[in-house]
Structure formats: structure tokens, C-alpha cells
Amino acid sequence: MIKIGMVGVGAISGIYLENITKMFKEIELAAVCDLIRDRAEKAQEKYNVPKIYDTMQELFADPEIDIVLNLTRPYEHYEVTRQALEAGKHVYSEKPLGAAWDEGKKLAALAEAKGLYLGGAPDTFLGAGIQTCRKLIDAGMIGEPIAAQAVMAGHGHETWHPDPEFYYKFGGGPMLDMGPYYITALINLLGGVKSAVGVTKTSFKKRMITSEPFAGTVIDVDVATHINGILTFDSGVVGTILTTFDVYSNDGMHLDIYGTEGTLICPDPNTFGGPIKIIRGEDKGSAYEIPIMFEYKENSRALGLADMAKAIEDKRAPRASYKQTLHVLEIMTTLNAGTGSTVELTTKYKREKPMVKPELAGVLD
């Protein structure tokens, strides 16, 4: 049993706690740590976690911990992951790998030097929806892919999130927050990206929080909040991506793949399931739904973590490795730079093997 040490017991931790303890049968939550000890104590009580640590350094020193699960805020990812790697632990991190391109490069180099596994979220691409889309594309259901369009359009987090300020600071913004879902899905469907062009703006320099408990607080916005990008894939496919916190939309999430024989309408890449639809030329514009062909269609966060644990045991590459998260980080930071000029990427990406339908749910191949 691969043992997990969780650092950070904030908002995203709930689904990880639930799935590690109840869904995935080959990993065990051995310890939790949070600067606010009450959070760790509540997690321990609800999920019967054996150990609580007051500092992450104490958790890293525990010889029983195999993988550190980094669920801290984006601007904290680098330092937490760095110290865990230095302590000899494999690391699975929430997205993004780092808040800056240089951070990601340093972490990848450190993991390689120490022979440790490093990877992370998002793992939604391993779910039933995107895996089914990959199967359809690879089988030629829309012919040869020509283009792709990804859109995540909304008006930010300050109206609903309990503590939204960090979304508008270093490590935040719509590209680093939501871009990982879309770009990770795109490269798993179409392969690596060779060049990118980004144009950005910040439409609102200040924002007022209207959600509790910080309602009335005014936030200074330090990051780009509207990013348009063009991606050229190694295959020749050309994609566009928009991520924005600046607009009002009642249906602001799209991921479409266009082929020579049809269009694949993919599910929201921030989810694990469907629906999936195809429009083929002979259907004269009519869309029909495709049944899902894989497991994990519900919220299965920690699926990538479970896959990493199995990869460590089997001495294979994890499906959500740093080679993927680093490539995604380079794409995002290139677009966020907003130069308006084509930038050739330095990282190369090759898709790992697709998911295999398990004989027993919660046990990976």
C-alpha cells in the first residue's frame, strides 16, 4: 500500500479525502498537515487519518510517507514541492506545477536529479469523458483533426468563493487557474504543442468581494484576467484558447475538436464525465450523443495520484507526470506573457497510454 501525506487541507481537499479513503484501493492516507490545525483535526476525525503534523517538514521526515500530496495555494506549490523532493519524497501537486515557468523547470530538474516521481493535477483527462473523446479521435471518427477551440469565460470568483483574493495575485488568473484543464485535455487529445501566441489584458484593476466572509473587501488585481491564445500543435492542428474572468456568460465553457469529417464536442474538461457529441458531415449539422466508454465519470480527483502510486510499484511512467504538467505550464506562462508574437516552446510532450477499463473500480492497471 502506497502511503500518502497531504499538505494543505483547504477547499479542494474534501474530494481528495473522500476518494483516497473510499474510492482508490491501492493508496492510503497516512498523515495530514495544515497551518490551521483545526482543519487537519477535522479531516482526521472524519476520515480516520492516523497522523497529524504541525509542520510540513515533520511530515516530510516521516519514513512511512511515500508520496506527498501538495494541496497548497498555487504560489506555494514550488516551495512545498521543492522541500518534499529534497526530503526524498515523490510528489503529486495540485495545478499548476509552479506559479512561474522558472519554478516548474527547477522542480523538474530536481526530481530528475533525485530519481523521484513528480506529477500532478489536473487528472480530469483520465476520466471517462476525455478518455472516450481520445478513443473517438484516435479511431478516426471525425477524420483528421484540423483545429480546436477552447473557451472558459466567466466573471471571476469574487461573487461566490469564500476567499477569492489569491485568484488575482501571483500564481492566479484564469489561465493558471482554469487553463490547466483545457490545455491538458487538448494535448491528451491532439499531442504536444510546438508554438504559442498570447495576447492579454486586465479589464478591471480592482474588484470587490461580494461573497462571505470578506464581502466588501476591495482586491487589487495583479495579473492578466483576459487571455487569448493560439496554439500550433506538433501534428499541424491549430487551436485557439480563451480564458477570462472579465465577461458575463451563461454557457462559458467549450472544448471542440474539428476534423475533416466532423466535429467532436467534448465535455467540460473540469469534470470527469460527459456529455460527448459528434457532428458529422453526412448528418447536415445535427449533433448526436456518444455513450461513455470508460470508468470514472463521477468526480474522481486523486485518480492521477492513484495512477502515480501504481506507476511507482510497476516502475512505469505515470500518466500525469511532470513531463505533462511542465509542458502545460510552459504553454500557459507563454500565453500569460502576452507578447503577441509566436514563441517556440522548449518542452516536448508525448501522450502516455490511454486508460484501461478496470476489472475492479479503484484498482488501476
Image (spheres, helix red, strand yellow):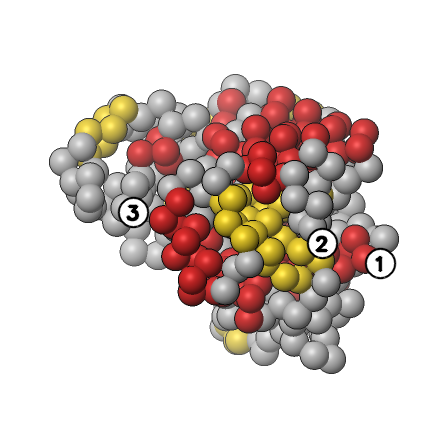
| Quarter that holds the N terminus | bottom right
Characterize the local packing of mark 2: few (<14), some (14-19) or many (20 or more) Cα atoms within 10 angstroms: many
Residue labelled with disc 3: 161
Q: Position of residue 32 (x, y in %)?
A: 52, 50
- Which amino acid does the dot numbered 3 rest on? His
Question: Looking at the picture, does residue 319 appear above or below residue 329?
Answer: below
Give the distance between the C-alpha atoms of the residues marked 1 and 3, in whole angstroms.
Answer: 40 Å
**Residue 24 at least partly seen:** yes
* Front position in the image: 204 or 117: 117
Specify whether 155 is left or right of 22.
Answer: left
Residue labelled with disc 2: 308
Secondary structure of the residue carrying tag 2 is: helix
Residue labelled with disc 1: 314
Q: Identify which residue is drawn at 70% across, 79% down.
A: 360
Instruction: Name the residue furthest left.
Output: 216
Q: Position of residue 185 (x, y in %)?
A: 60, 52
